[in-house]
């Protein structure tokens, strides 16, 4: 359990370091994309089972494939929505 927490902390530290480096280079858009990727992954992981069951009942595929397809679809949709919000906010702020 401790090893998993250390790995999670290191991953979050790496994400923060990439975000900080992008901001230092003047890339606020890269920060927005990074946040959009992280939010898309989190939402896709949270909605994997409910959306996966809908995909399975609609397409009749296996459980694993329907979960994978649900994660990809929800992840792409969430990324587009979050990136659009971040872009709008950055343009409005400037």
Image (cartoon, rainbow, N blue to C red):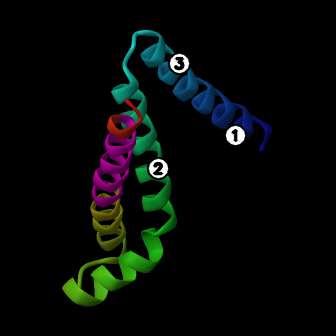
Task: Work out whether residue 35 or residue 42 is closer to the camera in this orientation and state it.
Answer: 35
Give the labeled residue for mark 3: 20
Sequence-wise first label, 2 or 1: 1
Identify the image quadrant of the N terminus: top right
35 displayed left or right of 75: right
* Callout 2 secondary element: helix
Q: Main secondary structure of the magenta part?
A: helix
The reply to whether discs 3 and 2 touch (Cβ–Cβ < 8 Å) is no
- Outermost residue, bottom direction? 57
Crowdedness of circle 3 by 10 Å Cα count: few (<14), some, many (20+)? some
Q: Which is closer to the viewer, label 1 or label 3? A: 3
- The part of the chain drawn in magenta is 76-90
Crowd tier of the residue under label 2, counting other residues whose Cα lies within 10 Å: few below 14, some 14–19, many 20 or above: some
Q: Secondary structure at mark 3?
A: helix
Q: Is residue 66 above or below residue 24?
A: below
Disc assigned to residue 4: 1
Residue occupied by mark 2: 39
């Amino acid at each position: 359990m401790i090893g998993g927490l250390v790995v999670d902390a290191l991953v979050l530290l790496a994400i923060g370091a990439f975000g900080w480096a992008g901001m230092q280079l003047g890339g606020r858009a890269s920060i927005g994309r990074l946040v959009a990727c992280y939010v898309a992954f989190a939402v896709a992981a949270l909605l994997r089972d409910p959306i996966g069951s809908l995909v399975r009942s609609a397409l009749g595929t296996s459980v694993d494939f329907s979960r994978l397809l649900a994660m990809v679809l929800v992840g792409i949709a969430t990324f587009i929505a979050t990136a659009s919000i971040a872009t709008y906010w950055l343009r409005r702020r400037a």
